[in-house]
Amino acid sequence: MEFAELIKTPRVDNVVLHRPFYPAVEGTLCLTGHHLILSSRQDNTEELWLLHSNIDAIDKRFVGPLGTIIIKCKDFRIIQLDIPGMEECLNIASSIEALSTLDSITLMYPFFYRPMFEVIEDGWHSFLPEQEFELYSSATSEWRLSYVNKEFAVCPSYPPIVIVPKAIDDEALRKVATFRHGGRFPVLSYYHKKNGMVIMRSGQPLTGTNGRRCKEDEKLINATLRAGKRGYIIDTRPLNVAQQARAKGGGFEQEAHYPQWRRIHKSIERYHILQESLIKLVEACNDQTHNMDRWLSRLEASNWLTHIKEILTTACLAAQCLDREGASILIHGTEGTDSTLQVTSLAQIILEPRSRTIRGFEALIEREWLQAGHPFQQRCAQSAYCNSKQKWESPVFLLFLDSVWQILHQFPCSFEFNENLLIMLFEHAYASQFGTFLGNNESERCKLKLQQKTMSLWSWVNRPSELSKFTNPLFEANNLVIWPSVAPQSLQLWEGIFLRWNRSSKYLDEAYEEMVNIIEYNKELQAKVNILRRQLAELETEDGMQESP
């Protein structure tokens, strides 16, 4: 298919663009295969370059011969185009709708994008499983790399290489895979060096109504227990949902077969419930006519902060089991690709100082989301404005990023990165020139040959010129476990995401720059103090030597 077939009117003059925080500007609108571009001949006017893949929905209005297209973006921005001529307006709207809903992944922009920057680091090879394993292998010899999934034959949503207990061979792993949803047998998610306890993750066990069991599965998760110790299984579904899953062939670990494990059920929502929550929240944030009562009631009715609370509470429970109880844990829901990953990754943010650095956080996203099989292509296909909802779209990753922001907000000096890194990841998960978030798992990315045909997001982010935008000037390395408060009073609306197109951040940006200047000036003064102290110490030493006979 040629893009030209979908572009009925490639160019229209005298189009007026309205967008947040900019004055209206008149210019020429151009449509390409991947971008909507508005260019003005006025000086000091920033051009609009909008990826079609960032468009969530469009509305059309007509007043006489003038047509208006309202574009609603996946990053929650709303843009208005006033187009002279009804036919031109209808053609542009029709082309935008077609180009923003392309079915084929290989027609998307990452396959056509050519970087204008020098590639210093190949991001596709920045966070390989072998490198992550090396960090653990110095502390323990009880785990090994398994290549059992090399051709994605055992589990299509796992990477080719996983970390498993050394005592379990690959043949046993194959048997366990037949007992777990989607073949997702328990694998290592995190090793707590302080006490040797671990977090594992998997899909639900396929016990069914007959109470089926798998001795290899029991042996695998028991291999992580120390003598006389109990472990915890955190099921992210309420008990009644887990019980209902048995009728469909799923289920949960029976106490009779896992006597050393205590099962805890939590309630983390998924799918359309989260999607509806996001829609309600964005609607509330965009409505500028609220009085205080209406705003607060609509914020509460969205339940967004309640979902944040549930996720953070479960992550804190997991961290507590490891760090304070000295117990290993297994985490799963149904598939083990959504709420499971929210909990495993947030628990690591709480426990592991490395995950709070820029490189460590990138490694966490790669390991616990991309390689772990979170279906980004499905979950991020639509955002808060699209009317045609499919059942698999859900802001699971955005909820995770919001939860990280809540912890960052409570511990502003413990993170090497600032909220700009989180916002950037949200934007690129939904629409990007990079191939990192394409596909639903490593198997799909391998078939698409993304490493050969597209650029990695990390290649761009990890350039020094970009890193400076994401670096937190308040950062002071903190090697302790950090325990976030999950009290309702402690959780806040993430304005940097949900209000950034409704309220100018000009004064906040100015205050931030002033803070950075003060910190830099303080460092300069500190350096001068250190020099003067050294000079004083040298003078005192010289005086002492002269006075001594």
Image (tube, grey):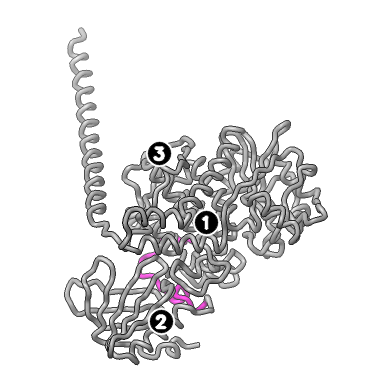
The amino acid type of the residue labelled 3 equals Ala
Whether residue 232 sits left or right of residue 359 in the image: it is: right
Is residue 245 magenta-colored? no
Mark on residue 366?
1
Q: Position of residue 77 (x, y in %)?
A: 35, 67
Question: Of the residues tagged 2 and 3, which is closer to the observer?
Answer: 2
* 480 versus 429 height, above or below: above
Sequence-first tag of 1 and 3: 1
Which mark is in front, 1 or 2? 2
Does label 1 or label 2 sit earlier along the sequence?
2
Residue under the point 47% across and 48% down: 360
Is residue 363 at least partly visible in the picture?
A: yes
Disc 2 versus disc 3: distance between alpha carbons?
47 Å
Q: Which mark is residue 55?
A: none
**In the shown orientation, is residue 428 left or right of residue 523?**
right
Q: State which region is magenta.
A: 106-123
Q: Picture coordinates of residue 348 (x, y %)? A: 53, 45
Q: Name the kind of residue labelled 1 in the image.
A: Glu
Under mark 2, the amino acid is Ile
Can residue 163 be seen in this snapshot?
no
When the figure is inspected, residue 456 is found, relative to residue 134, above or below; the finding is below
Secondary structure of residue under mark 3: loop
- Is 192 above or below relative to 37? above
Q: Quadrant of the C terminus?
A: top left
Whichever of labels 2 and 3 marks the residue nearer the N terminus, that label is 2
Which quadrant holds residue 56? bottom left
